[in-house]
């Protein structure tokens, strides 16, 4: 940990404050404004779809303008988008709300790269811990996000309009913090740009395929269940304060393990940590299927959060083994494009499933992507074993 990494960790916490507030209120505001109930999570889907669309653009901007300037632009976009969301809530304009969350996707795509930028602020041997520590900043979002949504829900006559305006202040604070961070240049000063391999060549590597699959499906399943939780709890007659509590501890589960996930990866390697994350996701589904009391929602979402942490940090660490320094913006954008595309489908699908089939049907549906991920991790483990055997035990890792 160093001052620069500490400031980036704070920016991650403020980013998650924005994200958790969006998740806590967008589905409910969408439900109140949508022409049809199944469209309730379109504003959530818009946020992640915007991230998918913006990911290649963010990569180009970072190559042209550098990390800090592009991150600052993302925060300015977050302020504009949150203001538009408040206008949409006040004017009861559903499609403006969807459009504003789509615009906020540019900020989402920017901030998702904080974890990769963290590796540039430390020695190479510390990259696993740097990723973990920055993601640990999400604990701030765990407490600020749900409480911000609760305390500002009725700050204005229109419910939740005040929460959107509060997010403008969160982004402004993050902008001030970001201005204090000095990132190393993506290319050495005075050196000619080095051409990396084409993306199709990078993407054919087994390590890259499995890393991207773990990040995308891990985030997709988590988003499927988390985005629907406030709506499912409302259907089960739980008050909004209970939904906020569940989301708060879910996000704690997502980010509290980050204090030691990096050490676990250094000791055991990313693959065993990812397998553990997959097992925790399956456990979450089983808990969710066992009942709809507050404690069922709470236990399921905490377990889901820890499972996501192991999958996402493990997948991110694995991905760093698949590209060279000159290829990082291209490869990182490709990983996040796959993540956001998957999240778009699950965010939209969560609203349709929970309002038509119910909470239990949606959890049963989550077992399919988890099974696919299990097959992918098993394939990589088998491939690693064959490589070690072929090299007489001299190769360790993918």
Image (spheres, rainbow, N blue to C red):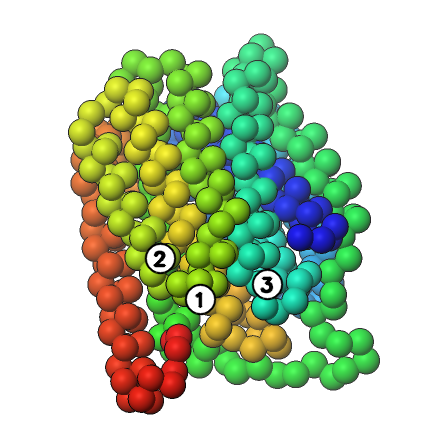
Which residue lies under the disc numbered 2?
Answer: 274
- Residue visible at 61% across and 69% down? 124
Query: Can residue 340 be seen in the rendering of this structure?
Result: no
Q: Residue at x 30, y 71 (%)?
A: 380
Residue at the spot of label 3:
126
- Quadrant location, the C terminus: bottom left
Tally of marks: 3
Q: Considering the numbered disc 3 on the image, is that residue within a helix, a strand or a loop? A: helix
- In the figure, 353 relative to 202: above or below? above
* Residue drawn at 43 percent across, 38 percent down: 253
Quadrant of residue 280 in the image?
top left
Q: Residues within 10 Å of mark 3 (few under 14, many from 20)?
A: some
Circle 2: element type: helix
Looking at the image, is 120 positioned above or below residue 221?
Answer: below
Q: Tell me: 80 left or right of 202.
A: right
For marks 3 and 1, give the one nearer the viewer: 3
Q: CA distance from mark 2 to mark 3?
A: 19 Å
- Disc 1 marks which residue? 318
Residue 131 location (% of width, % of height): 55, 56
Q: Earlier in the sequence, mark 3 or mark 1?
A: 3
Quadrant in the picture for residue 86:
top right
Q: With 58 as the anchor, is 360 left or right in this view? A: left
């Amino acid at each position: 940990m160093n001052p620069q990494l500490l400031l980036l960790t704070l920016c991650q916490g403020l980013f998650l404050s924005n994200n958790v507030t969006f998740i806590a209120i967008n589905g409910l505001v969408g439900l109140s404004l949508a022409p049809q109930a199944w469209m309730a999570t379109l504003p959530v889907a818009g946020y992640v779809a915007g991230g998918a669309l913006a990911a290649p653009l963010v990569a180009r901007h970072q190559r042209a303008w550098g990390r800090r300037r592009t991150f600052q632009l993302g925060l300015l976009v977050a302020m504009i988008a949150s203001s538009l969301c408040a206008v949409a809530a006040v004017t009861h304009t559903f499609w403006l709300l969807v459009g504003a969350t789509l615009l906020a996707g540019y900020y989402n795509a920017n901030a998702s790269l904080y974890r990769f930028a963290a590796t540039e602020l430390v020695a190479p041997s510390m990259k696993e811990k740097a990723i973990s520590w920055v993601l640990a900043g999400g604990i701030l979002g765990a407490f600020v996000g749900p409480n911000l949504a609760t305390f500002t829900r009725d700050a204005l006559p229109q419910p939740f309009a005040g929460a959107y305006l509060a997010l403008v202040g969160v982004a402004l604070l993050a902008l001030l913090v970001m201005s204090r961070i000095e990132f190393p240049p993506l290319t050495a000063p005075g050196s000619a740009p080095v051409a990396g391999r084409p993306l199709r060549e990078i993407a054919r590597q087994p390590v890259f395929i499995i890393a991207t699959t773990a990040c995308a499906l891990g985030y997709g399943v988590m988003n499927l269940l988390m985005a629907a939780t406030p709506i499912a709890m409302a259907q089960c007659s739980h008050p909004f304060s209970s939904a906020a509590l569940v989301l708060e501890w879910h996000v704690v589960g997502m980010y509290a393990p980050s204090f030691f996930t990096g050490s676990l990866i250094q000791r055991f390697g990313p693959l065993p940590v990812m397998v553990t994350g997959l097992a925790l996701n399956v456990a979450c589904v089983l808990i969710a299927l066992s009942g709809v009391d507050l404690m069922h929602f709470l236990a399921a979402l905490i377990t889901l959060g820890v499972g996501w942490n192991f999958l996402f940090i493990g997948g991110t660490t694995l991905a760093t083994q698949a590209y060279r320094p000159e290829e990082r913006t291209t490869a990182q954008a490709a990983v996040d494009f796959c993540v956001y595309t998957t999240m778009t489908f699950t965010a939209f699908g969560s609203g349709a499933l929970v309002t038509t089939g119910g909470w239990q049907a949606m959890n049963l549906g989550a077992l399919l992507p988890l099974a696919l991920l299990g097959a992918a991790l098993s394939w990589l483990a088998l491939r690693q074993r064959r490589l070690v055997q072929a090299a007489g035990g001299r190769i360790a890792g993918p």
